[in-house]
Amino acid sequence: MTTDVRSEGPVRIQMADGPGQPPATPELAKLYREFESELLVPLWTEIGDLMPADPRSRAAAHRWRWDRLRDMAGQAGNLVPVGRGGERRAIALANPGLGGRPFATPTLWAAIQYLNPGEDAPVHRHSQHAFRFVIEGEGVWTVVNGDPVSMRRGDFLPQAGWAWHGHHNLSETPMAWIDGLDIPFQYQTDATFFEFGPDEVPTRQAPHRSKSERLWGHAGLRPLTHMAPSPASPLLAYRWENTDRALHDQLALEKDGYPATLEPGHAAVRFTNPTTGSDVLPTIRAEFHRLAPGTASSGSREVGSSVYTVFEGQGRVNVGSAFWDVERGDLFVVPSWQELRLESENGMDLFRFSDTPIFERLDLGRHRAIIEETQA
């Protein structure tokens, strides 16, 4: 049996001290009890919490080690079956600031999913927008609306909400990858829908390229037979070899004297919807960042939260007051408006996803670079 964590009990109003607060009298206490009985809350006692000077996220900066995640996922692979009821052998990251809920941030869900050889993760669909990002391995195929798509290291595979999808491991070894969804956002806004599909994934033979790649996987070219814009990307696989080449070429051009728009030694790309040029998913932004050896970024803050995965290399991360040494596969959370700094002695690749599109559509997006002041 589960409990709805949004039900937090009756209204309780506390006497408040400070400027603008009325004196604490028996009459005021009686009025507050009457407010409580009618489920009313005076703004003057809550304004500092409800409308702070800047965002104060309940989420905490936190890091998860890939070696521990991978090891425990393997143990789950030996103990936990995949099928109806649980649906997925997925282990979610639970932010320590969010009351034990399986949420990486107030709006984003992240998990490691694990599939044994020959296993099917049964077909279903849901209103949540999702993606898969492969840190290591290959051999699993995801089938989205009947289109089989191979999954290999470094591939980013977005999937729009309400698309039928299942996974099948055709290889002889287990495989693990990262799942990202907007589950917390849709949960908090009471917008979720879910529906079961077939128990078995409907394919055992997979083509070299999916239908989506054959139609949409040509850089800079848009098929005139499919001109209608779609809110989510119809391209189901953004291949690592293309991402890697784009990052490499950015840094190479910088060495050739081409001016960098980011800081020196920092290359970045954003995955986009080929029908609109906007983000791949309506509620999720996805990017890849590469820090050249010896690169250190200045600090920055932005409204909205992010989850980063170290794809390759090692580095040092500073989020707010937290500092970590990170390496391949590690994941960490950057809560809203907490300062982020990155540095790497030998180079580091980072996959990042965030809830930025939500805030930009609401005209609530804000970004601030932290410029170091030096004394002469």
Image (cartoon, rainbow, N blue to C red):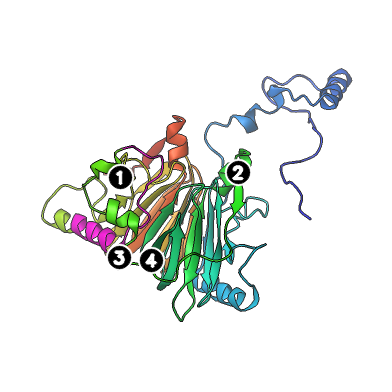
Q: CA distance from mark 2 to mark 4?
A: 28 Å
Q: CA distance from mark 2 to mark 3?
A: 40 Å
Foreground mark, 3 or 1, reads: 1
- Label located before the other in sequence (2 or 3): 2
Residue toward you, 116 or 197:
197
Foreground mark, 3 or 4, reads: 4
Tag shown at residue 192: 2
Amino acid type indicated by mark 4: Ser
Q: Residues within 10 Å of mark 2 (few under 14, many from 20)?
A: some
Residue ID at (82%, 35%): 10
Residue ID at (47%, 42%): 283
Tag shown at residue 97: none
Q: Name the residue tied to disc 4.
A: 150
Q: CA distance from mark 3 to mark 1?
A: 30 Å
- Label located before the other in sequence (2 or 4): 4
Q: CA distance from mark 1 to mark 4?
A: 20 Å
Residue toward you, 98 or 119:
119
Q: Residues within 10 Å of mark 4 (few under 14, many from 20)?
A: many
Q: Name the residue tied to disc 3.
A: 347
Residue 191 in the image: x percent, y percent?
60, 39
Position of residue 183 in the picture relative to residue 210 (left or right): right
- Label 1 sits on a secondary structure element that is loop
Place residue 122 in its image quadrant. Answer: bottom right
Residue ID at (65%, 77%): 79
Place residue 95 in its image quadrant. Answer: bottom right
